[in-house]
Amino acid sequence: MTRTTAQRVAGWTLVGIATFQAALAAGAPWGEAAYGGGNAGVLPAAERISSVVAVPVYLALAGVAFGRIGSPIVRRRVLRGASVLIGTGALLNLASPSTVERMVWVPVSVVAAISLWRAAPGREALVAQPV
């Protein structure tokens, strides 16, 4: 996977996650697929607020993954950190009692974590270029 491919995969995966979170916030009856799967149907208010907050975070992260936001060093740090956090999320989804979370979000999280890591600028991009 080239860096450009990784950037596109990471960015569009994050846009997809943001879209899912926006749907949850708007009242989509997908509670079984989120937050441990303990709420069938529409999420309670607290989780819906969490989804509202998550949308701009995922979209900003997508902007970083696409290479539109941040310097190379900022992008590298943000993308590597997000990769570790989302990879940890994959483990949490794997331990979820929700079958939907295990079957859908584990693979999505793994793809996101790997592509975020690969999308991070390499060390060569961090070296100051002569003018």
Image: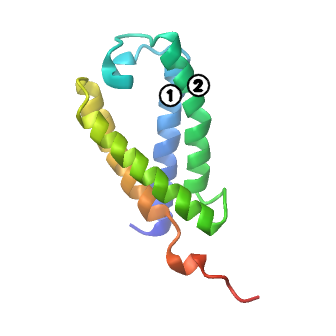
User: Viewed as shown, does residue 40 lie left or right of 67?
Assistant: left
Q: How many numbered callouts? A: 2
Comes first in the chain, label 1 or label 2:
1
User: Viewed as shown, does residue 4 lie left or right of 86?
Assistant: right
The residue located at (61%, 68%) in the rendering is 72
Q: Position of residue 100 (x, y in %)?
A: 27, 26
| Residue 52's disc number | 2
Q: Position of residue 52 (x, y in %)?
A: 58, 25
The residue located at (57%, 48%) in the rendering is 61
In the rendered image of this protein, does residue 49 appear above or below residue 58? above
Question: Splitting the image into 4 quarters, where does residue 97 fall?
Answer: top left
The residue singled out by tag 1 in the image is: 21
The quarter of the picture where the N terminus appears is bottom left
Question: Splitting the image into 4 quarters, where does residue 38 fall?
Answer: top left
Few, some or many residues within 10 Å of mark 2 (<14, 14–19, 20+) = some
Q: Report how far apart the C-alphas of labels 1 and 2 lie in the structure.
A: 7 Å
Viewer-nearest of discs 1 and 2: 2
CB contact under 8 Å: marks 1 and 2:
yes
Q: Position of residue 40 (x, y in %)?
A: 34, 11
Figure colour scheme: rainbow
In the rendered image, is residue 34 in sight?
A: no
| Residue 40's disc number | none
